[in-house]
Image: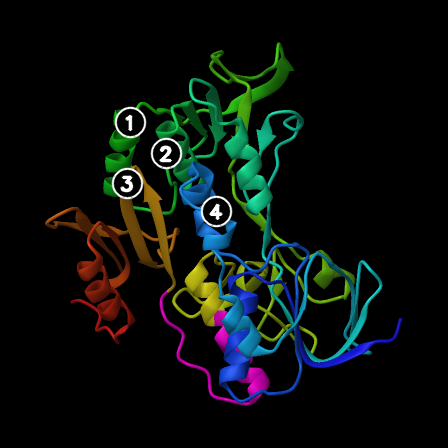
């Protein structure tokens, strides 16, 4: 099979990959661009997987990242359902599972992340959510009157728990930390969402670990360290994700819990970049390398990489933003809290919700807003503006 030659090969067709292709075109790159995905679906949004798609309120056709007309205008070489298995920085060539060879001037890894699993917990009735197939498979198991164990009280676990409860499923959330959304939100927001979830009939069990798992009689049985046992035919593992770095490691790129990149999202190989959930970069706020799972961060890094490839100046780095939807309430967050420093929180009640401003070393470092979009926008503007240290 003969090889195809492209200007840029983008490996991964999620938010980061698609945004990078769009940015390259907007910056004047007219040469061939390949967008390669291991999924057979056209590129789609990921946030609805644990919410509207899981609930059945939408379908795959309504969560496409771009319309067919936009993709046609972008004039991309789209390869779907064919994973990249080999990447050679020296020859600037990649190969897919089908044997297709592609030569590139630049390559962008936008391979995302893979769900973390648990030892002893796999088999019938065990799910995770990372793609459309995962979401639809779990949806089929969420029969009204059935029971679901959610392992992990983070954003995704609580979103799925909220959705399942609305479908008439009895839900128990198991979280080893002493509160939900540990390390992600303030105590105020965690406490208020705890009450909301419990008010919706969800049982939250936290500050305790699962000692062992056993499958029998068509159910999974989680034995806790205090002797209690929680059982259900369906289990969702929502304990976070690991960077999908298999191709990067095969290529010999520097990886450390993610593909290590510089301020231009360039990896240890000169013409290869990494963006989104698979990349780890130094955040100027903390002067610490970290991996950020956020649609906004993925799109920001996509534009940074595209700027470097196109020889353009990149926009300044801004505070990362996140959002979650639980129990019909919209939670928006921005900024990064240093876990090694004390944090002073200021809570402001709003017409429909509340805002929490979080300060460290006399500076505003993060903000949370629930059902308060206007207040959130104003707070983010302050967060991104130069700040004087409070006396």
Q: Earlier in the sequence, mark 1 or mark 2?
A: 2
Q: Secondary structure at mark 3?
A: loop
Tell me which label, 3 or 1, sits earlier in the chain.
1
Q: Is residue 103 left or right of residue 356?
A: right
Residues at marks 1 and 2, CA–CA distance in whole angstroms: 8 Å
Q: Are marks 2 and 3 in contact (CB under 8 Å)?
A: no
Query: Is residue 2 among what the camera can see?
Result: yes
Q: Residue furthest right?
A: 1
Residue at horizontal 56 percent and vertical 87 percent from the top: 310
Q: Which residue, given by chain and number where applicable, does mark 2 sit on?
A: 162
How packed mark 3 is, by other alpha carbons closer than 10 Å (few <14, some 14-19, many 20 or more), is: few
The one of 182 and 152 positioned closer to us in this rendering: 152
Left or right for 223, reference 57: right
Disc 4 secondary structure class: loop
- Name the foreground residue: 92 vs 30: 30
Mark 1 near mark 2, Cβ–Cβ under 8 Å?
A: yes
Labels 4, 3: front one = 4
Q: Quadrant of the N terminus?
A: bottom right
Where residue 124 sits in the image (x, y, percent)? 65, 25
Relative to 273, does residue 257 appear above or below in the rendering? above
Does residue 266 lie above or below 232 as drawn? below
Mark 4 or 3, nearer chain start = 4
Spatial separation of the CA atoms under disc 4 and disc 1: 25 Å
**Highlighted range, magenta:** 301-319
| 172 relative to 40, above or below | above
Confirm whether the magenta stretch covers residue 251. Answer: no
Q: At which x and y percent is residue 54?
A: 46, 39
Instruction: Pick the residue in front: 51 or 302.
Output: 51
Dot 4 surroundings within 10 Å: few (below 14), some, or many (20 or more)? some
């Amino acid at each position: 099979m003969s090889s195809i030659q492209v200007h840029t090969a983008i490996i991964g067709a999620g938010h980061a990959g698609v945004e990078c292709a769009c940015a390259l075109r907007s910056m004047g790159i007219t040469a061939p661009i390949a967008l390669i995905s291991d999924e057979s679906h056209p590129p789609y949004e990921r946030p609805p997987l644990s919410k509207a798609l899981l609930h059945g309120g939408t379908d795959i056709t309504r969560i496409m990242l771009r319309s067919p007309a936009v993709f046609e205008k972008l004039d991309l070489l789209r390869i779907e359902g064919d994973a990249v298995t080999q990447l050679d920085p020296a020859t600037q060539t990649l190969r897919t599972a089908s044997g297709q060879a592609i030569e590139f001037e630049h390559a962008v890894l936008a391979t995302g992340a893979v769900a973390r699993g648990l030892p002893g917990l796999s088999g019938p009735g065990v799910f995770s959510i990372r793609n459309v197939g995962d979401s639809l498979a779990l949806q089929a198991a969420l029969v009204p009157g059935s029971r679901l164990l959610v392992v992990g009280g983070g954003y995704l676990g609580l979103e799925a728990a909220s959705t399942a409860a609305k479908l008439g499923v009895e839900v128990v959330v198991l979280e080893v930390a002493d509160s939900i959304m540990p390390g992600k939100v303030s105590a105020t927001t965690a406490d208020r969402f705890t009450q909301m979830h419990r008010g919706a009939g969800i049982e939250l069990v936290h500050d305790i670990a699962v000692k062992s798992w056993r499958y029998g009689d068509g159910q999974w049985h989680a034995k806790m360290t205090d002797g209690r046992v929680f059982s259900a035919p369906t289990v969702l593992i929502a304990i976070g994700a690991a960077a999908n770095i298999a191709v990067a490691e095969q290529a010999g790129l520097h990886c450390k819990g993610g593909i290590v990149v510089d301020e231009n999202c360039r990896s240890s190989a000169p013409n290869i970049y990494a963006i989104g959930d698979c990349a780890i970069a130094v955040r100027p706020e903390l002067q610490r390398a970290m991996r950020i799972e956020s649609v906004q961060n993925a799109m920001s890094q996509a534009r940074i990489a595209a700027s470097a490839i196109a020889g353009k100046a990149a926009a300044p780095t801004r505070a990362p933003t996140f959002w979650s939807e639980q129990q019909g309430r919209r939670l928006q967050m921005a900024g990064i809290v240093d876990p090694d420093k004390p944090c002073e929180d200021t809570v402001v009640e709003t017409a429909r919700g509340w805002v929490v401003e979080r300060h460290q070393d006399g500076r505003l470092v993060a903000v949370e807003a629930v059902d308060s979009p206007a207040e959130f926008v104003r707070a983010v503007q302050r967060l991104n503006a130069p700040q004087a240290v409070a006396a």
